[in-house]
Image (spheres, rainbow, N blue to C red):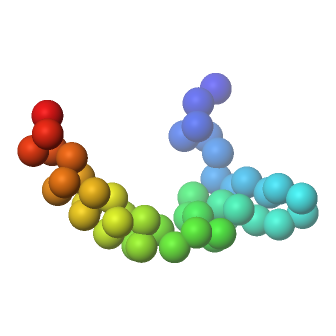
């Protein structure tokens, strides 16, 4: 069994992920912050 088989996740009666889409976090914001952080980290490697 792998995570690819999971479509929905419910925690305490609320959907956290529905149809493989995160419901409780702003994914676009997380990706944008990650890209900005990566720009600072990569030159240090």
Left or right: where 42 falls relative to 10:
left
Which sits in the foreground, 13 or 5? Answer: 13
Q: Is residue 43 or residue 20 the one in the foreground?
A: 43
- Residue located 15% across and 44% down the image: 42
Q: Is residue 2 above or below residue 5?
A: above
Q: Residue at x 64, y 53 (%)?
A: 7
**Residue 19 visible, this angle:** no
* Residue 39, picture quadrant: bottom left
Res 3 visible: yes
Q: Residue furthest top?
A: 1
**Percent of width and height locating residue 38:** 23, 52
44 lies above or below 15? above
Q: Which residue is farthest front?
A: 44
Residue placed most toward the observer, 6 or 25: 25
Is 30 rendered above or below residue 38? Answer: below
Residue 28's x, y, as percent? 40, 73
Where residue 31 sits, quadrant-wise, is bottom left
The tally of labels here is 0
What residue is rendered at 56% in x and 64% in y? Answer: 21
Q: Is residue 21 left or right of residue 38?
A: right
């Amino acid at each position: 069994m792998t995570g690819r088989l999971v479509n929905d996740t419910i925690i305490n009666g609320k959907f956290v992920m529905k149809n493989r889409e995160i419901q409780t976090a702003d994914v676009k914001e997380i990706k944008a912050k990650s890209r900005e952080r990566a720009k600072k980290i990569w030159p240090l490697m």
